[in-house]
Structures are given as structure tokens and as C-alpha cells.
Amino acid sequence: MISEEEVRHIASLARIGLSEEEVGKFSKDLSLVLDWIDELKKVDVENVEPTAHITGVENETREDNFSDFNNKNGIIKLFPEEKNGYDKVKSVL
Amino acid sequence: MIKDLHNKLINKEITSEQLTLDYFDRISKKDKDIFSYLTLTKDLALEQAKKADEKIKKGEKIGLLEGIPGAIKDNICINGIRATAASKILDSYIAPYNATVIDKLNEKGAVILGKTNLDEFAMGSSTENSAYGPTKNPHDLNRVPGGTSGGSTAAVAADLASWALGTDTGGSIRQPAAFCGVVGMKPTYGRVSRHGIIAMASSLDQVGPIAKTVEDAAIVLSAISGRDKHDATSAHSQDKNYEEFLTGEVRGTKIGVVKEYLNSLEKNVREKIEKVIEFYKKEGAKIIETELPHVKYALPAYYIIQPCEVSSNLARYDGIKYGLRIDDGDNSAISGNSSDLPKTLLETYFDTRQYGLGRETKRRIMLGTYALSSGYYEAYYLRAQKARTLIKKDFEKAFKEADMILTPTTPSPAFRLGEKTEDPLKMYLEDIFTVTANIAGIPAISVPCGRIKEGKKELPIGFQLMGKWFDEENLLRVADAYEKK
């Protein structure tokens, strides 16, 4: 069971604002899904290695060269607030 | 069908420009009801079509996809075109570069008609999670097209595109393909570059073709697959012309069938699948029983791995670098009484993500954040990755005897709009037969196998073939043999 307090904590870690109504709803939803996922506790994983990359690609390396991006303006235009070619950010405090 | 259109082009029965305009004409008439497209790219399409026509006029040879109009799921970036991933948080996002698959399609001279609807950030099984409204199933407008590539499959089913690209993380190409009565394929993980695809669950995501026929799917796959230096997870696999492997021959092919899967089906679906098995038997394929003991853990493992990777990938939508921002400045997406608006960076994050992300997206981010939070990593993510190893081993064992495995694509045909939106678990169970291929990284294809009567409508149903890693050509060969029957 995920309590409303836990929901608020998780939402804060995830940087998502929630309304009171959403807090209640997510408490119910997350509990339901996590109970169902508990099925996985039944599988014996003793001495089993985890799989991160399924076809086994490992240590892909390349020369550490840089190349110029040809559409810098396209990126700058996406800034929510631009100043002199920089992305303007809100104050931290 | 692509070959038919190709022949019409080179025999000068129609120009690519006219073909393209015909598609836009149909879209303007039919897409009000279906809503498969979010953005149309008419200027771009006509420019590409004219290039193909120019080559034909000069008597130059053209490729199979050249001048043939298709559609692109809206989580795939095209330079200069809006890419929303069906989320409000990317409503104003204009992609500043091409996905590698788009570069490849451009090289082949394909025509792109527009960007298709999906569940927000490709999370869902019905396309109802789109921030722009649901796509409808062309076979019954009261039903869902499936998801998340529901816009792409509906567009192909209604002939609003001759082919389309989708993405598949847990069944998002195959399940809607089955619901819409078209062919859909998820290639082996790494077969197709993910560069320029809006990332969702990176260890599972894969781009694939949606088409009217298996041959068309093969032609599109040939165009988009291959190693890409921009995607370190893309495989060092050889490029192939998959359409050249479609011999119609299945004699001697060993097809595995999972008994529990068949037994779990309703009678009307089961009959359809059994008919497919009968067909292959008659044609000389060898049907064998396959056991996949850990596959029952694939779905719960998926609903840990996927949300965990989502919570990490979607952290980038913070209102800072691009997309929606809510704050007390002039450029805020919401204006009003400035005392209510966020003033600090942290408040901007909270408000931007609260308003910009939809319910299912938030639910998955929260689930993933919980599972990855301190003290839970081993019990959830690590355990799921270990289960993944066991499932992979099941397939390695099964493929020692079977060349491929045949299952239904979905337990039932398309459901009604709104039928499953209130119960996340019901929606998640939609992926029961498809999710395994993503967990194991293997290729899988859904092929239509008849229709089931529901009330006054006849709804399509599909079967799925799952194959060995990097063995797309044999899957396509066997799928094509059934289709040609």
C-alpha cells in the first residue's frame, strides 16, 4: 500500500506537482500496480546475472572527435526564454 | 501494394505528385472521423514527390519506396517539423534534426505525408492517452485502434498512407496492427537506429514498419535498418533486402506453439489461430510444442523496467531547455495572476510537469521513481533484469528446436473507447502476448488472420510470429506465405 504521504514524496522526487485529488488517485493506482508486480517475487533469481543489453553489445567505442552541429539556430529557437543566444533559467532560490 | 504503386509510377500511369495529392484528398475527407494525423507535412511531401517525378521523367531508375507516400509516428523527429509525442509538454517543439530513419527514408526518396497520433510518449494500448484526443479504429469508429502506434495503423488501414513507421516498446506496433487489420513488425532490438526517436524505455524501444502487406513491411524495413554511429546500441548487422526472401515456401520450417497461450483464449479467437496453425501444417511446416516457463513473468518485469527507464528518460522535460514552461515570466505557457505562478526553478519544474504531462505518463514516472528510489532498486529493477535473463534463456532453449514461435497477437479484437481507461491494470494486460518479444529483444510480426463478429461489425484479429535474434527474413518469409494463401 502506498500512502498519500509516500505519493507526495515520490512526486517531489520526480518533480511533478500533484493536486489533492491526484494524490488520492495515485495512492490507489500505484498500490494496485505494485501488488500485481509482486508476482515477480515468486521467480527464483538466485545466481542469475541481470540483463541490461539484450543482444549483448558491450563497450562500443569511437574516436573522441567532435563535429559541428549544423542547426544551432534550430535549438536556440526552442529555448523557452532566450537572451543573447543563451537559455535563460529561473533563479534557483 | 508498394510494388503496384511503384509500377504505376514507372509506367507513367500516375505521377508521385498526383498520388500524394490523392492521399491528402482522402485524408481531408476521412481523417476528421478517424483522427490518425496530428500534423500534415504537405509542402515537404510535394517537394519529395516532385523529385521522384523528375527522375522518372528523365528516365532514371527509381527505388521501390521512391515517390511512395507514408506516415511517421509523432515521436520520430523530422527536421523543421513539429514533434509532439502527443504530449502538451512538447506542443511547440520543432525538431532541429532528422532521426536516422528519416535520413534513410529521404535517401530512398520516400514521401512523408505527416505525423501520426499516439499515446502520450508511447505509453498505453489504445491511443486514448494522446493529449490531442483519441484515434478511432477505421473498422468501427466506436472502438480504439490499439496503441501506441494507433495513428499509424489506422492511417494505413484506412488508406490514408500506403505505409507507416511506428515504435514498439511492449507491443505498440503489433497490437494496433492486429486491431486495425494491417501488418506490423518489431525488429530485433538494435536492428533499427533509435537516434532521433523520442526516448521512452531505451532498453526496449524499437522502430518498425506498419504496412498493408508483409512484402510492404519488408520493403520499409530494408529502407530503415542498419548500423548507425549515432546509436551505440544499434547492431553491427548486415543490411539486407528483406523483400527478396519472400519465397512463399514454408516446408520444413519448425514452428513452435505454446499450449498455455492457446488454452487461455476465447473460443472465437482460438479457432482463428488454430486455422493458421492448420495452414502451416498443410504447407509442410513442422508444428512443435514449445515451453517458455518464465514467460509469465514478462509482463510484471516489463512494468518495472519500462516505468524505471521512463522516469529517467522523461526527466528532461523540465521546462528549461525546450517545450512548455510555466513560470511568472512573459514567455510562460500560462499567464494570469502572477502571485499564483511559480517563481523559483523548483516551482517551475513542478508546475510545468504537472500541467504538461498526462495522467498515464505521470503514473509511470511515479512508479519508476518509486521502484528506483533508495532501498527498492534490488527488489524491483534488478530483480526484473534478472527475470529478463531467465526469459532470454527460455527463448534460447526454445529456438534450439523451433525456428520461430506462433502466438495470437492479442487475446481479443479491438475494445470500445473508454472501456479500459479507468483501470490501469486492465490496459496493461493488453500487452500479454506482445511484451515478451521486447523483454527478449527478438523480432516479432503481427499478421491479420480473419475477422470476428462483434455486434454488427466485423473486427480484425492477428497472429504473431516471434523469431530468433536478427532472423527477420525468415519471419517475413513465413508470414508472407500465410498472407499469399
Image (tube, coloured by chain):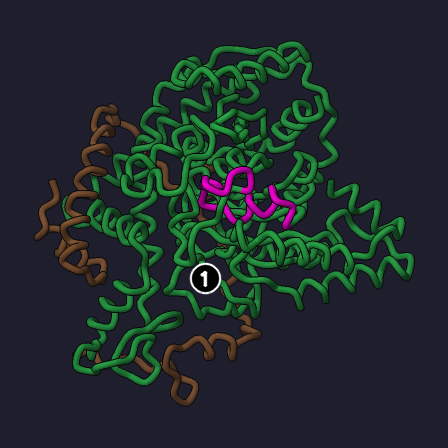
Q: Which residue is at a point 47% across and 30% down the rendered structure image?
A: B413
Left/right of residue B453 with respect to residue B183 in the rendered view: left
Residue B390 part of the magenta segment: no
Quickly name the residue at label 1.
Answer: B84
Q: Which chain is green?
A: B
**Relative to B243, does residue B117 appear above or below in the rendering?**
below
Q: Where is residue B305 shown, x and y percent of the image?
A: 32, 41
Q: Where is residue B417 shown, x and y percent of the image?
A: 40, 42
Q: Which residue is at a point 56% across and 11% down the rendered structure image?
A: B287
Q: Where is residue B167 shown, x and y percent of the image?
A: 50, 46
Q: Which residues are magenta?
A: B138-160
**Relative to A51, does residue B59 appear above or below in the rendering?**
below
Question: In terms of image quadrants, where is residue B425?
Answer: top left
Q: Which residue is at a point 21% across and 82% down the rendered structure image?
A: B337
Q: Quadrant of the N terminus of chain B?
A: top right
Left/right of residue B163 with respect to residue A47 in the rendered view: right
Chain A drawing hue: brown
Q: Amino acid at mark 1?
A: Thr
